[in-house]
Image (tube, grey):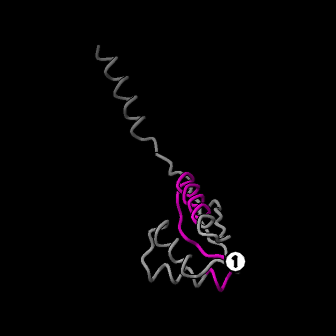
Amino acid sequence: MDEFKTNLDEELELKERQEVKSPPLYRVFLLNDDYTTMDFVVHILETVFNKPPVEATQIMLHVHKNGKGLAGVYTREIAETKTAAVVELARQNGFPLQCSMEKE
């Protein structure tokens, strides 16, 4: 009986030492175009990415000046969902806004 308990204790110690790996993260970018309004981009950043108004405006200006801007960093599933939400909302409102994601 003691031998069984010792083996079980050793097995539990091994399991406790195993490290948990963080899931890979993805950067979600908004891409500039000549048709989507700045107000709509700010709206997307506030609603889809939960950015406060000042930060959303700063990101929008970065997108406008540089062609693309970082909207956030998320796990794959969340990044895919946010990317799809941006495209869907843009199409519903008649804008060609594009969104992309890249592995970090």
Which quadrant of the figure has residue 66? Answer: bottom right
Query: In the image, is residue 84 part of the stretch drawn in magenta?
Result: yes
Instruction: Count up the numbered dots.
Output: 1
Q: Is residue 8 left or right of residue 48?
A: left
Q: Is residue 48 magenta?
A: no
Above/below status of 41 relative to 18:
below
Choose between 82 and 24: the one closer to the eye: 82
Residue 80's x, y, as percent? 59, 55
Predominant SS of the magenta segment: helix
Q: Residue at x 50, y 74 (%)?
A: 43
Badge 1 is on which residue?
A: 33
Q: Residue at x 66, y 68 (%)?
A: 98
Q: Look at the picture and state if 33 lies above or below 99.
A: below
Q: Is residue 7 above or below residue 45?
A: above
Residue 87: image location, x then y, percent: 62, 63
Choose between 72 and 44: the one closer to the eye. Answer: 44
Residue type for callout 1: Asp
In the rendered image, the residue lying farthest to the top is 1
> Which stretch did the figure color magenta?
63-89
Quarter of the rendering containing residue 71:
bottom right
- Local packing at callout 1 (Cα closer than 10 Å; few below 14, some 14-19, many 20+) is some
